[in-house]
Amino acid sequence: MDKELLTILVCPLCKGTLTLDRQSNELICRKDRLAFPIREGIPVMLVDEARRLEE
């Protein structure tokens, strides 16, 4: 994923920063505990598509 794109993208819920998890190919919002998938190089920034992270 492009580093410049990562600096632009924010969580759609809290507008907080996201971190890239290269191993699972997801963007992580630690505040909302959500993992947004990256499919075919495109981040899917829909809350309904996000995976809830365990505590």
Image (spheres, helix red, strand yellow):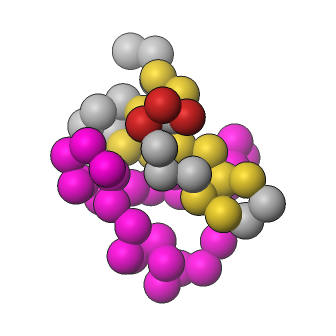
Is residue 12 visible to the viewer in this orientation of the structure?
A: yes
Residue 2 drawn above or below residue 19: below
Residue 35 visible in rendering:
no
Residue pushed farthest top? 55
Number of numbered discs: 0
Horizontal arrangement in the rendering, residue 41 relative to residue 44 (left or right): right
Q: Does the magenta stretch include residue 8?
A: yes
Q: Which quarter of the rendering shows the N terminus?
A: bottom right
Picture coordinates of residue 21, whole percent (x, y): 59, 50
Q: In this view, does 54 lie above or below 2?
A: above
**Span of residues in magenta:** 1-27
Relative to 11, 27 lies left or right: right
Residue at horizontal 42%, vertical 36%?
47
Q: Is residue 9 magenta?
A: yes
Corner quadrant of residue 40: bottom right
Q: Residue, x 36% and y 30% (percent of image)?
A: 33
Q: Is residue 41 above or below residue 25?
A: below
Pick out the residue farthest to the bottom. 4
| Residue 42 x/y as whole percent | 66, 63
**Picture coordinates of residue 9, whole percent (x, y):** 39, 67
Query: At 55% across and 34% down in the image, what residue appears?
Result: 49
Q: In this view, does 4 lie to the left or right of 7?
A: right
The residue nearer to you, when weighing 15 against 53, is 15
Which image quarter holds the C terminus? top left
Q: Does 3 appear above or below 20?
A: below
Foreground pick, 22 / 11 = 11
Q: Position of residue 15 (x, y in %)?
A: 22, 55
